[in-house]
Amino acid sequence: MKNTTPSSAPRHIEAPFIRNIERLRESEIRLVMRDRLESHPIDCVNWPSYPYAPRATFRIAHSDEVLAIMFEVEEEHIRALNTTPNGPVWEDSCVEFFVANPAGEGYFNFEVNCISTALAALRRSRTDADHFDEERIAQVRRFGSLPTAPIDSRGEGQQWWMVEIIPFSLLGLKEPPQSISCNFYKCGDRCSRPHFLSWSPIDCEEPNFHKPEFFGRVDLV
């Protein structure tokens, strides 16, 4: 099945170094990321049966200790009804970061809905996973533009943003790698217009983000 984006080749970008970004206040992190980092589109509509494409972008940087990712979204339906860690957040207005395990086999998936409810796991496949316990999930610092309370709101041009700070230690690392193999997603399985967007294109028949063979590359510079 042909990807609907201009190119089906895996994407490749750079993540700049920002010293001690994890020690900044939330407002400072957002300003630094918004003002100093390039915005990258999550715009691959891989499955024509789901043509809806809300505007979704991400910015990424790193320090000696963490990856910092900022998602920005504009969509027609903001839904976030899941409030339990490791719940089905992909049903809500959700952004996701999948990264190949840099210290071994498998891949990590970090999924968070627009009210900061998170799912995290080390996976061998879509159905074979070791989910993080709540203590490890809490190590992923998350903050965004919406309150951490259930929401179900419709209307054109609704906007939200979310920042995730992921320690390299959660990836089994003591220092940053030279690069990571990863993908970024925007989904909403139970939104009024279900959608499944990716940064780097995916070539398979049905919506499935658990395809590390289609990950792109981010160089940590």
Image (cartoon, rainbow, N blue to C red):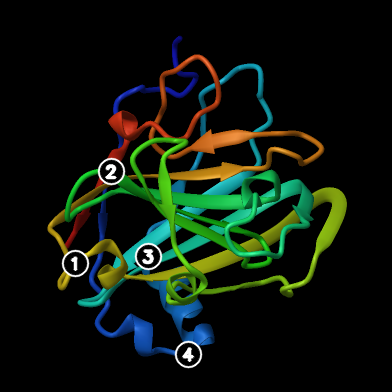
Image quadrant occupied by the C terminus: bottom left
The label on residue 130 is none
Q: Is residue 190 above or below residue 138?
A: above
Q: Which residue: 47% across, 58% down? A: 120
Residue shown at 45%/9% (left/top)?
1
Residue 19, above or below 40: below
Front residue (pair 166, 8): 166
Q: Residue at x 41, y 19 (%)?
A: 203
**Camera-side mark, 3 or 4:** 4
Tell me the amino acid under the disc marked 4: Arg
Q: Nearer the viewer, residue 191 or 38?
A: 191
Q: Earlier in the sequence, mark 2 or mark 1?
A: 2
Which residue is the site of mark 4? 25
Dot 1 lies on which element? loop
Residue on which the image places disc 1: 173
Of circles 1 and 4, the one toward us is 1
Residue located beneath label 2 in the image? 106
Amino acid type for the residue under numbered disc 1 = Leu
Above-or-below relation of 84 to 142: above
Q: Which mark is residue 37?
A: 3
Whether label 2 touches label 3, CB < 8 Å: no
Which amino acid, mark 2? Gly
